[in-house]
Amino acid sequence: MSKVTLGAIHSKYIHSALAPWCLAAAMEEYCRLPHEVLVREGTVNQPDEALLDLLTRDAPQVLGLSCYIWNWTTLRRLLPELRRRLPDTVLVAGGPEVSFCPERVLWECPALDYVVSGEGERPFSLLADRLEGGEDVADIPGLSFRREGGVVTLPPAFPREIHPSPYTPAYFAALGNRIPYLETSRGCPFSCAFCLSGREDPVRFYPMERAKGELLALAATGAKTIKLVDRTFNCNAARTKELLTFILDHWGREIPKGVCFHFEVGADLFDQETLALLSTAPKGLFQMEAGLQSFHPQTLAAVSRVTDMARLEQNLRTLIAMGNCHIHIDLIAGLPQEDLETFGRSFDLAFALRPQMLQLGFLKLIHGSRLRQMAPELGYRWDSDPPYECLDNPWFHPEDRQILHRCEDALERLWNSGRFPLTVEYLLESTGLRPFELFCRFGDFAAAGGSLAGIRLDEYTALLWKWGKGQPGVEMEIFRDHLLCDRLRRDNTGRIPPCIHRPDPRVGEVKRLLRECLKLDGCDGAGFGAAILSDGQTAVALYRDKDPVTGNYPFALCSRNQLEKGEIF
């Protein structure tokens, strides 16, 4: 019996693996010879020595490595020492970072013996059996290997079969308190040029009863977030409604309260019946990530992005207005035909929807994507190391990239963090700036003072206060009021940042009245926070029952009379 170790190196501890457990389950079903299969998981943040010990401790006959954009630099660095410590072990790499360039990988990484391209369940199982039985491997689909001074590359198969479930007792024992990932379908109905998912055969869906059973099993692990890796969860309307209905019917029983399901969706694919169903969901049960990428028609055409933009915009407005689902929208900077001006317009249109998160991402020329193949003739330059970020192209220049990176930092800290939404809204109204202008200008200002890495919240608040004071149209007292309200309803210490703190003898009396009228059992932090605003009203935040969508605590503005009567929340 051979010993097989399957290694997965994550970007963060909170992530869990899916691919090695898929391979392990497949080997159990597909292999004709017995194998002892062990899954070992680490993170790129661990020291090299710890990772080497993790991957070599079992002294396996076969070591399989799952290679992704986030771990390939680390794995490539470890390979020579892995070979030295495991001289007789067969080293096999698979995953998207090696699947589309196996010849180059084998030439550049002499420590590797094989690369498996495409779906690995059957090829890896066949390889393990053939190696154990001393048989030839030359006809295994998707396998690449050295032979007679060259590299043999066999084309991968595109199976239509449904592989066995990875959710075995061993998987659940290893999960711990990390985020579990669930796959209820494989493939994507679209063929966007910047992505890999549409390269496969048409979408194949796992049996509905299996999907439902796995939803319940993962919900019972104690995990707070379950991420579905289906590339377009809602591409089949009837199936989507059935799964959403199933989750809603079991919420509060087999699906504990507090569990959240995260989906990637095509927002334009929702019909009215599905939107009505989503409107009935408890707050925080669903998170949805909707990739817009761009509003620029020429850009969407250039990357084969097929979207009904009018319907997408209307559906997103409907979803966001419901207030019960966390909505995440993506934009990608660096796509063809989009310059800084048109990207700014896309940004403004996306921000106008007011999603809880607007992600400003940068194009990555990933192996296997059609855009990477087209990139040289389009005039692209990109970083040769993962994550292969676009450096420039005929529409997107290095100075634009720097502007957008600073804009991204401001967007993350001011809006996506949920810490300053009231202040951002006030600044937009008072200055008359477009959203893109505001985030770019403040991003430039914040970066001018040096690195923002590790900056504390109070220091960043002070930067915003300093910048706002210099903006035409900003009334400082009202600006301060908005900063106070943002900080109070988000920070459960109830502490006022030094830059806007003013001693006020009335605050002590206000807090006394609040302690008398508020029942503070079960509260977080200080229990409540309070501040007196420029118009004499008191801003009060109660630190319990945090909103699962916005992350804010209950918040109210009240008069002295309301305080004395206890009429606050």
Image: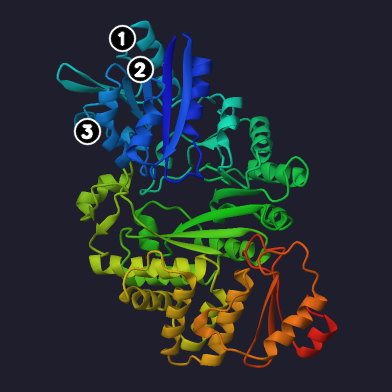
Q: Amino acid at mark 2?
A: Ile
| SS type, badge 2 | loop
Q: Are marks 2 and 3 in contact (CB under 8 Å)?
A: no
Q: Amino acid at mark 3?
A: Arg
Q: Which mark is residue 136?
A: 1
Residue 110 appears left or right of 170: left
> Gap in Å between the C-alphas at discs 2 and 3?
19 Å
Q: Are marks 2 and 1 in contact (CB under 8 Å)?
A: no
State the residue position of label 2.
140
Viewer can see residue 118: no
Dividing the picture into quarters, in which one does residue 337 lie? bottom left
- Residue 28, placed above or below residue 424: above
Image coords of residue 471 (percent x, y): 42, 89
Image coords of residue 218 (percent x, y): 64, 37
State the residue position of label 3.
104
Which badge, 2 or 3, comes first in the chain's sequence? 3
| SS type, badge 3 | helix
Q: Amino acid at mark 1?
A: Asp
Q: Total marks drawn?
A: 3
- Residue 404, placed above or below residue 498: above
Q: Nearer the viewer, residue 235 or 98?
A: 98
Q: Residue at x 31, y 34 (%)?
A: 98
Q: Nearer the viewer, residue 201 or 325?
A: 325
Q: Residue at x 49, y 83 (%)?
A: 499
> Gap in Å between the C-alphas at discs 3 and 1?
23 Å
- Residue 108, placed above or below residue 533: above
Q: Nearer the viewer, residue 521 or 385?
A: 521
